[in-house]
Amino acid sequence: MIITSLLDTDLYKFTMMQVVLHQFPGAEVEYRFQCRNAKAAGIADLAPYVNEIREEIRGLCKLRFEDAELAYLKAMRFIKSDFIDFLGLFRLNEKYVNVTALASGEIEVSIKGPWLHTILFEIPVLAIINEVYFRNTQKQPDLAEGRQRLETKIHQLQAHGLRELKIADYGTRRRFGKAWHEEVLRTLVNRLGTGASGQLAGTSNVLFAMKLGLTPLGTMAHEYLQACQALGPRLRDSQVYGFESWAREYRGDLGIALSDVYGMSAFLRDFDMYFCKLFDGARHDSGDPFKWGERMIAHYIKNRVDPKTKTLIFSDGLTVPRTIALYQQFKGRCQLAFGIGTNLTNDLGYEPLQIVIKMIRCNGQPVAKLSDTPSKNMCDDEKYLAYLRQVFEIA
């Protein structure tokens, strides 16, 4: 079985899930799967593996949180005891997931049900699809190539003048496989070090954070702000509503705002002086990261906030050379964090699957992300997309 623990997911799934339990327990949502590179990159079709994927999801739905896992979560200062009590009773339900093979050779994955009971599906289902695909197409993976590539990355990070550069693993959803993911992390722990003097800041994966003594990292994802389009008082205020609801839950903890659900310009219009001071920083996940960083710094200065007191997190398709270039441009001007995903956990010389599962509806209403990278947009209602652009003044 690929997934053997419900902690084998990203931390932000739990931080969002706690908000859902406390503030939106009755919300109903729908998610949909998309493979962005299936045809263009010559990736083999996923349909032949649909039964294996279903079987792995069936196994996932039999898992429960173990006492030691709950104790680990409970020790986090921002996790509340009633949420732990809920997780102690929690189990994923297979009835909310439908996996279908299409005549085109692709697959359709739909997740539909109560948000509170479906939010934990995304990351393990994506990890399952990846591992099923690669164990069928690369029966004898070139681990030597993967290790050599990882060694090159480590040498690049250990170059002169980069001692203060820290990276984090964000690669669960698109990893080559669970065993390789763990090997990569163990290698980084041994070679880069952790803690104040190390260069590995932590991992988004809660299971490996617990297992390897790493810092678990993450705050909010796009689905949270997308859902607020249906849950807030009015659409134009949905981003502000999302940030305020988050602050109400965490009271200053987990203070990194996601900036690209409506694009950077719309984000900056809403991210006023109050939010500049209230939140610890912002995360980039689409568009030009260099321009984004310059705009964030200028925005802080405009709002009379010292950028050096704020953190800019970069997490969009990072490679180590790109990370180094960003570090060199912004070091000393703000606090920096870098989350590297696919390039860390799925770089063995094979074309990685660019797969996502995104929320498309909440309480029966379309929801969408209007990214600064148009290929990342996902919505099945063009009229709603047009309306969203109009409301948020997006060209």
Image: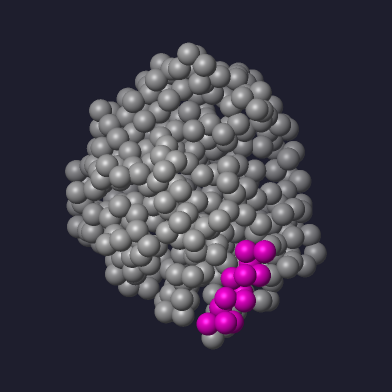
Residue at the extreme bottom: 304
Is residue 170 toward the left or the right of residue 156 in the image? left
Is residue 320 toward the left or the right of residue 88 in the image? right
Magenta includes 146? no
Where does the magenta region start and end?
291-303
How does the figure colour the protein chain or chains? one colour
Q: Could you tell me how many numbered marks the image carries?
A: 0
Is residue 320 toward the left or the right of residue 7 in the image? right
In this rendered view, identify the residue nearer to me: 109 or 67: 109
Q: Position of residue 307 (x, y in %)?
A: 59, 78
Vertical comparison of 57 with 301: above or below: above
Residue at position x 40%, y 28% from top? Answer: 109
Q: Position of residue 342 (x, y in %)?
A: 60, 42
Is residue 166 toward the left or the right of residue 59 in the image? right
Query: Which quadrant is the N terminus positioned in?
Result: top left
Residue at position x 50%, y 21% from top? Answer: 106
In this rendered view, identify the residue nearer to me: 265 or 128: 265
Q: Is any part of residue 36 visible from this angle? A: yes
Residue at the extreme right: 160
In this rendered view, identify the residue nearer to me: 95 or 222: 222
Q: Is any part of residue 179 visible from this angle? A: no
Residue at position x 41%, y 43% from top? Answer: 383
Q: Position of residue 129 (x, y in %)?
A: 48, 28
Q: Which SS does the magenta portion mostly show?
A: helix
Vertical comparison of 252 with 385: above or below: below
Q: Position of residue 48 (x, y in %)?
A: 49, 14
Quarter assignment of residue 332: bottom right
Vertical comparison of 199 with 279: above or below: above
